[in-house]
């Protein structure tokens, strides 16, 4: 009899643990999800995992009372690969199929000038943002500054037209806009890595601090499941 009671207790404990675990999974699934769709800037190239943009952003949001999941797509590099991710990858198709409670930060385009002309960059981003708008996924469009060599390859007014593209597309699709990912970091060598381009851990900390209000505004638009 004692053995039977012991077995029953163990079974009940296991069932309780399983139900508790299921509740945790359900709670996790209910959290708003931020998808970061972008290049090596937003994916914190060269920065330790515990100090990346995504890690710091999650901590900052948690500190402000926002429990979230952050899904890093990984380096999509250019606008074309970002569009392909959304329209062809399993995760991108899943986002389209189940858009509720998901928001997207889009930071793409800076690497395009060595591969694509500006009209193609604009068309790619326009299509990508159009799909997300159709699915009613809130988006924060994050601009970047054009590299100097882009103007040599594409004409002297490239940098100006490139910068305007982000605000024009955000306005067209009624998205939020953060004009320059590296605001507060560009021009400060101590906040950049040895390549004088990618933010270091201290730079990412400043970027998160500056961008946090816009990300919170983005989360406020999330539609719960």
Image (cartoon, rainbow, N blue to C red):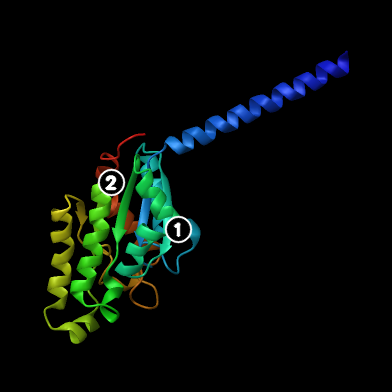
At 74% from the left edge and 24% from the top edge, which residue is drawn?
A: 11
Give me the C-alpha separation between circle 2 and circle 1. Answer: 32 Å
> Which residue, as the protein is rendered here, is positioned at the far bottom?
152
The residue carrying mark 2 is 135
> Which quarter of the rendered picture does the C terminus lie within?
top left
> Which quarter of the rendered picture does the N terminus lie within?
top right
The residue carrying mark 1 is 51
> Which residue, as the protein is rendered here, is positioned at the far top?
1
Residue 56 appearing in the image:
no
At 34% from the left edge and 34% from the top edge, which residue is drawn?
A: 224
At 29% from the left edge and 49% from the top edge, which residue is drawn?
A: 212
- The foreground one among 120 and 174 is 120
Residue 186: % across, % down? 26, 69
- Asked whether, in this view, residue 84 is left or right of residue 27, the answer is left
- The foreground one among 97 and 167 is 97
Residue 204, above or below 71: below
Q: Quadrant of residue 147?
A: bottom left
Residue 38, above or below 190: above
Q: Which disc, if any, is residue 150? A: none
Label 2's element?
A: loop
Label 1's element?
A: helix
Residue 77: % across, % down? 36, 70
Q: Of the two numbered discs 2 and 1 on the same chain, state the one appearing first in sequence.
A: 1
- Asked whether, in this view, residue 21 is left or right of residue 129, the answer is right
Residue 66: % across, % down? 36, 38
Q: Residues within 10 Å of mark 2 (few under 14, many from 20)?
A: some
Residue 101: % across, % down? 35, 40
Q: Quadrant of residue 75?
A: bottom left
Residue 86 appearing in the image:
yes
Residue 192, above or below 14: below
> From the viewer's perspective, is the residue at label 2 or at label 1 nearer?
2
Residue 16, above or below 143: above
């Amino acid at each position: 009899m004692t053995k039977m009671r012991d077995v029953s207790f163990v079974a009940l404990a296991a069932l309780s643990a399983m139900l508790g675990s299921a509740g945790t999974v359900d709670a996790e699934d209910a959290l708003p999800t931020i998808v970061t769709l972008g290049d090596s800037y937003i994916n914190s190239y060269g920065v330790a995992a515990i100090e990346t943009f995504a890690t710091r952003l999650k901590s900052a949001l948690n500190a402000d009372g926002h429990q979230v999941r952050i899904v890093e797509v990984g380096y999509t590099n250019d606008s074309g690969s970002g569009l392909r991710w959304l329209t062809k990858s399993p995760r991108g198709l899943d986002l389209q199929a189940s858009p509720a409670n998901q928001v997207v930060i889009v930071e793409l385009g800076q690497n395009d000038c060595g591969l694509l002309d500006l009209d193609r960059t604009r068309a790619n981003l326009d299509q990508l943002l159009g799909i997300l708008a159709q699915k009613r996924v809130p988006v924060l469009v994050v601009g970047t500054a054009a590299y100097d060599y882009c103007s040599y390859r594409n004409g002297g007014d490239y940098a100006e037209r490139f910068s305007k593209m982000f605000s024009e597309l955000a306005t067209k699709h009624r998205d939020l806009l953060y004009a320059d990912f590296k605001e507060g970091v560009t021009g400060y060598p101590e906040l950049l890595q040895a390549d004088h381009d990618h933010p270091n851990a201290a730079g990412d900390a400043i970027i998160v601090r500056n961008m946090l209000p816009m990300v919170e505004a983005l989360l406020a638009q999330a539609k719960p499941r």
